């Protein structure tokens, strides 16, 4: 429940901000200070129904517009986003906690999908086959689904929604975005930008809320598809519930990403990339590096190199880091106090299971932000692969080094895990790299690249418990997901060659 002095983030319905009447709210924190800076409305049934009705009306208007007019709106959105992205980055930093450069990077990667979407007329072309039978042509159309739902996580409040909504909108659909309750303001900002770009009312809707809003989208017959990114248990729930209701689903789940380091690798490069991939965004990303599998005898040397680099990292917020320097910090706080406690508990588990805590970030405090949700870069050596701290996703700045005896042992460890999101190999041996990319059971593979997130014209998604549904995000698969194909068989009869009545089964001739 909100109070009189705390601003409330409402919804975006019918092309305008919409105050909530539900009487339910959730707090939105500044993770660097621990303060509640605003609250977010939690939708009720009436608001869910209003959002869906508005989106349905918006779809009917938008899908009837020519591709040329739709393309002009998307180009305008791209231009406005490019000009105003620093505003958006500041919102992300305030509500999520990631440092400003990381927020700008998130926007840049999301903008790649917007740029892909500007070329949608080529990507949703149908096909044509002339005279497949005498006087008969067959052609295909790609048409939009209708109203589609996007449920996005807290860790990328801009980039992850942009994996979906530019393509869905370009293809002629209307989108209802349900952002995370933890950082909802970026979604409203993007809705306002779409309005400025000329998008008709109802085509982009923001519905804030909790499980009630999620279930409202999952169960509404008007909503034709659901796109989701989040933890594996929720991804599985989204997939099962939406599929049961006859919807298309792309539900991307959790991860436990490994880097296999062969003895011939450049260990300075490996250490740099392990730092970047393990601690960037405070580890709150599904493509974060969690485990370094070091093929002996390189583990000790590699750990020393990683330790040295951790010592140079600055954790903080704004312009001041934990060491008092005035340069921008390398990583910021975690999203909530509860999540910080969860990450800390995983380190406790690792320690109890015999892991050696080489660098411990559990007690980090940032001067001037003692109530912030900060957690320092943590490095663990010799953790048992039976430990929950190894098998489960931590989603924080915790990097583990596991010593293996061979390439084969490393591949077996990766393939035996429940997740299959991203992985990487670091080596100078092209044959080993080629064998790795073939044998590994993971959806996205890096060769001397630690976070192998594909560019926008390829598609993003993992295997096993990291992806539920048949379609990955963005790229060609994204356009296939947000359209359905219609095949048309056409014959225009020549009056001079009318065939008369024939009750037999049609045959080609």
Image: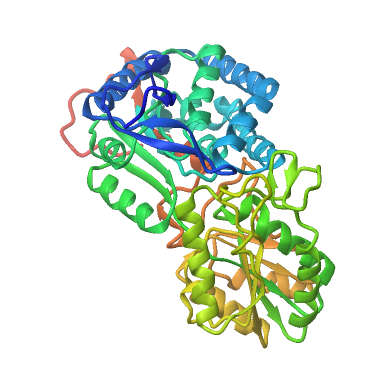
Residue at horizontal 27 percent and vertical 27 percent from the top: 23
x and y, in percent, of residue 89 in the image: 64, 32
x and y, in percent, of residue 222 in the image: 26, 29
Figure coloring: rainbow
How many marks can you see? 0
Which residue occupies the foreground of this view, 68 or 402?
402
Residue at horizontal 68 percent and vertical 36 percent from the top: 104
Quadrant of the snapshot with the N terminus: top left
Q: Residue furthest left?
A: 503
Q: In this view, does 499 lie above or below 93?
A: above
Q: Write down the quadrant of residue 326 in the picture.
A: top right
Which residue occupies the foreground of this view, 78 or 371?
371
Q: Is residue 159 above or below residue 276?
A: above
Asked whether, in this view, residue 136 is left or right of residue 384, the answer is left
x and y, in percent, of residue 321 in the image: 73, 48
Quadrant of the snapshot with the C terminus: top left
Q: Write down the quadrant of residue 507 in the picture.
A: top left
- The answer to whether residue 271 is visible is yes
Q: Is residue 62 above or below residue 183?
A: above
Which residue occupies the foreground of this view, 253 or 367?
367
x and y, in percent, of residue 345 in the image: 48, 67
Which residue occupies the foreground of this view, 470 or 86?
86
Asked whether, in this view, residue 326 is left or right of residue 481, the answer is right
Residue at horizontal 72 percent and vertical 64 percent from the top: 274
- The answer to whether residue 127 is visible is no
Asked whether, in this view, residue 211 is left or right of residue 294, the answer is left
């Amino acid at each position: 429940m909100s109070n009189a002095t705390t601003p409330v983030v409402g919804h975006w319905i019918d092309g305008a901000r919409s105050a909530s009447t539900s009487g339910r709210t959730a707090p939105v924190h500044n993770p660097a200070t621990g303060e509640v800076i605003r609250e977010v409305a939690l939708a009720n049934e009436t608001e869910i129904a209003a959002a869906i009705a508005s989106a349905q009306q918006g779809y009917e208007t938008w899908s009837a517009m020519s591709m040329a007019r739709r393309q002009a709106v998307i180009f305008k959105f791209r231009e406005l986003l490019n000009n105003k992205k620093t505003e958006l980055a500041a919102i992300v930093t305030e509500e999520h906690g990631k440092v400003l450069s990381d927020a700008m990077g998130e926007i840049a990667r999301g903008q790649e999908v917007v740029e892909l979407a500007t070329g949608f007329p080529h990507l949703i072309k149908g096909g044509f086959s002339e005279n497949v039978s005498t006087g008969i042509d067959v052609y295909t159309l790609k048409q939009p689904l209708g109203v589609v739902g996007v449920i996005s996580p807290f860790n990328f409040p801009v980039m992850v929604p942009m994996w979906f909504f530019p393509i869905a909108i370009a293809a002629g659909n209307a989108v209802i975005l349900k952002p995370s309750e933890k950082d909802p303001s970026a979604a409203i900002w993007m809705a306002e930008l779409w309005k400025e770009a000329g998008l008709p009312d109802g085509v982009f809707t923001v519905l804030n809320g909790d499980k009630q809003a999620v279930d409202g989208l999952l169960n509404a017959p008007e909503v034709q598809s659901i796109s989701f990114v989040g933890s594996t248990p929720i991804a599985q729930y989204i997939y099962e519930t939406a599929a049961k209701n006859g919807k298309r689903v792309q539900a991307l789940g959790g991860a436990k990403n490994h880097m296999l380091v062969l003895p011939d690798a450049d260990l300075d490069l490996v250490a740099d990339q392990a730092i970047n991939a393990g601690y960037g965004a405070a580890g709150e990303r599904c493509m974060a590096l969690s485990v370094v599998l070091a093929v002996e005898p390189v583990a000790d040397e590699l750990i020393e190199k990683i330790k040295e680099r951790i010592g140079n990292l600055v954790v903080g917020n704004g312009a001041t880091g934990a060491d008092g320097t005035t340069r921008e910090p390398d990583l910021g706080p975690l999203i909530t106090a509860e999540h910080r406690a969860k990450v800390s508990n995983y380190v406790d588990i690792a320690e109890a299971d015999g892991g050696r805590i080489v660098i411990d970030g559990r007690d980090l405090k940032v001067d001037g932000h003692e109530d912030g949700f900060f957690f320092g870069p943590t490095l663990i050596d010799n953790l048992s692969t039976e430990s929950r701290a190894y098998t489960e996703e931590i989603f924080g700045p915790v990097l583990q080094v596991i010593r293996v005896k061979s390439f084969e042992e490393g591949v077996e460890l990766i393939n035996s895990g429940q997740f299959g999101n991203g992985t990487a190999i670091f080596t100078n041996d092209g044959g080993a790299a080629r064998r790795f990319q073939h044998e590994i059971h993971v959806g996205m593979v890096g060769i001397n690249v630690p976070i192998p997130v594909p560019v926008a014209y390829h598609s993003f998604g993992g295997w096993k418990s990291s992806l539920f549904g048949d379609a990955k995000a963005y790229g060609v698969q994204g356009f296939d997901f947000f359209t359905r194909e219609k095949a048309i068989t056409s014959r225009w009869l020549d009056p001079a060659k009318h065939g008369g009545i024939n009750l037999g089964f049609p045959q080609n001739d």
